[in-house]
Image (cartoon, rainbow, N blue to C red):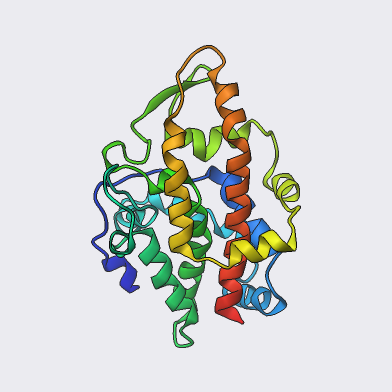
Amino acid sequence: MLKIVLFSLFLIPTFCFAWGKIGHRTVGELASLHLTKESKNRVVKIFGSESMAEASLWPDRIKSDPKMRKLYSHLHYLSFDKNENFNKNSANKKNILTAIETFTNILKNKKSPNSEKVIALRFIIHLIGDLHQPLHIGYPDDRGGNTIKVSWFGNKTDLHHVWDDEIIKLEELSYTEYTKKLNTLSIKDISKWQSTGPLTWAKESRAYMPKTYEFKEKKHWEFEYSYKHLDFLNTRLKQAGIRLAGHLNNIFN
């Protein structure tokens, strides 16, 4: 059994599904296009025929199993209060950052059995995506926006779900189409984004996160809100995919 399941992580359970299926698949697919040849071979050796896009969904799917949810659902986020400074000490609590570190070490360890590497790689793909969703570095009192209820085009939902799914759905693209749209990147951006690590990526999410609360529900507020945040959301998907590729390239090369 992986050591990671022994984590007594976190403050309040949450069952959010960051980025939703299209977002996570897009991150996985984009990353797969920027792997080195050696990294691609290593991924195939671990996964077989499973694609990175499909593997990205497994850590959310297992939440339907109560036992798996209890073991793993708290790995997806890092929450701290509004007045608490996000520093090295707060980041050292057991959370999404320590989970990424633990799964990374499993992939680096030549003695790790492939069964553990499959789980570790699935989580790395998923969690680096999660880390770029601002509300996964949110407030514990509203569970990262999960308790902020809103009406989205007449349907009841919550702020977290708006960021996971609803804004992305307005693009009306499949994950392969979304990947093609986002895969217009400069070498300068790729190099810059891959020069930092998970702690920096978490700080970026936290810095933007308060802006996600800047809205007033009114007629057609959904269009205004989506327009305001879409560019940032797309940038975060790009960064997640490119950084995931860089992270795996560092592990496997």
Q: Quadrant of residue 173?
A: top right
Q: Can residue 20 be seen in this snapshot?
A: yes
Q: Residue at x 69, y 33 (%)?
A: 172
Q: Residue at x 70, y 50 (%)?
A: 179
Viewer-closest of 238 and 206: 206
State the image coordinates of residue 167 (x, y, percent, origin top left).
58, 33
Q: How many marks?
A: 0
Q: Position of residue 239 (x, y in %)?
A: 60, 55
115 w.r.t. 196: above or below:
below
Residue 152 locus on image (x, y percent): 51, 22
Viewer-nearest residue: 119 or 75: 75
Q: Residue lying farthest bottom?
A: 111
Residue 52 is situated, as x and y percent measured from the top left of the image, at 61, 61
Residue 1 visible in the current orientation: no
Is residue 60 shown above or below 196? above
- Residue located 26% across and 38% down the image: 141
Name the outermost residue toward the top.
Answer: 219
Q: Which corner quadrant holds the C terminus?
A: bottom right
Nearer the observer, 3 or 108 = 108
Residue 72, picture quadrant = bottom left
**Vertical position of residue 207 compared to residue 195: above or below:** above
Tell whether 24 sits left or right of 82: right
Query: Is 26 positioned to the left or the right of 59 in the image?
Result: right
